[in-house]
Image: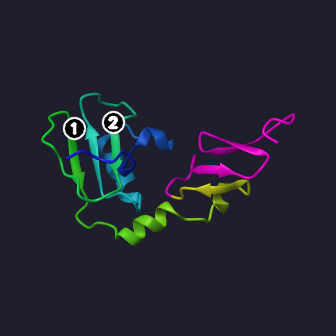
């Protein structure tokens, strides 16, 4: 079965420092969208070993390089969608107008005019740049 790229993300892209299988498990447990995770175990301590899956219908493929875990109790599709599309970005600063509230830091994806998003944070533009 092929997969849709939008159905998973790598923890390194979330500003979470996940260097262990247990850390990957914890990230999955705290993400309302997570349905499963797989952990690449041949590069111990690397920060890009943890992949979080956010859709159902996937299963392990027998790989000897990764361990795959699925949640016993899956979040409902409504809960996953609500977590994806939350519009309350207040905790990310007044300049953030679109965000992913599953992450404490680096969650902003769109800023108000006069600010640029960089690494999930809003930075004020200077000297007319981006105005």
Dot 1 falls on a residue whose secondary structure is: strand
Say few, some or many: other residues with alpha carbon within 10 Å of mark 1 (under 14 / 14 to 19 / 20 or more). Answer: some
Apparent side of residue 94 relative to residue 121 in the rendered image (left or right): right
Horizontal side of 92 relative to 28 (left or right) equals right
Q: Closer to the N terminus: mark 2 or mark 1?
A: 2
In the rendered image, the residue lying farthest to the left is 62
Image-quadrant location for residue 87: bottom right
* Disc 2 to disc 1, C-alpha distance: 9 Å
Residue drawn at x 67%, y 62% is 90
48 or 81, nearer to the observer: 81
Q: Nearer the viewer, residue 23 or 79?
A: 79
Q: Quadrant of residue 61?
A: top left
For the magenta stretch, what is the residue range? 102-131
Q: Is residue 113 above or below residue 19?
A: below
Seen in the picture, residue 64 relative to 2 is either above or below; the reply is above
Choose between 14 and 84: the one closer to the eye.
84
- Give x and y (percent) for residue 42: 24, 29
Please say whether residue 11 is one of the residues in the magenta stretch: no
Farthest residue in the top direction? 43
Image side of residue 18 versus residue 1, left or right? right
Q: Where 64 falls versus 87 (above or below)?
A: above
User: Residue drawn 23% across and 51% down?
Assistant: 69
Please identify the residue farthest to the right as the structure is shown: 127
Numbered circles on residues, count: 2
Q: How is the image coloured?
A: rainbow
x, y percent for residue 31: 41, 58
Q: Main secondary structure of the magenta part?
A: loop
Q: Position of residue 37 (x, y in %)?
A: 29, 49
**Residue on which the image places disc 1:** 66
Q: Is residue 68 left or right of residue 48?
A: left
Report if residue 118 lies within the magenta region.
Answer: yes
Q: Which disc is residue 49 wearing?
A: 2
């Amino acid at each position: 079965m092929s997969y849709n790229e939008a159905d998973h993300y790598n923890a390194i892209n979330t500003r979470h420092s996940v260097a262990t299988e247990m850390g990957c498990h914890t990230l999955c447990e705290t993400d309302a969208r997570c349905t499963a995770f797989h952990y690449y175990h041949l590069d111990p301590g690397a920060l890009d070993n943890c992949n979080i899956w956010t859709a159902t219908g996937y299963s392990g493929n027998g790989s000897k390089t990764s361990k795959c875990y699925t949640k016993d109790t899956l979040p409902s599709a409504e809960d996953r969608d609500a977590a994806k599309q939350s519009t309350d970005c207040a905790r990310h600063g007044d300049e953030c107008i679109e965000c992913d509230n599953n992450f404490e830091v680096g969650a902003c994806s769109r800023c108000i005019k006069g600010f640029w998003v960089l690494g999930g944070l809003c930075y004020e533009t200077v000297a007319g740049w981006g105005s």
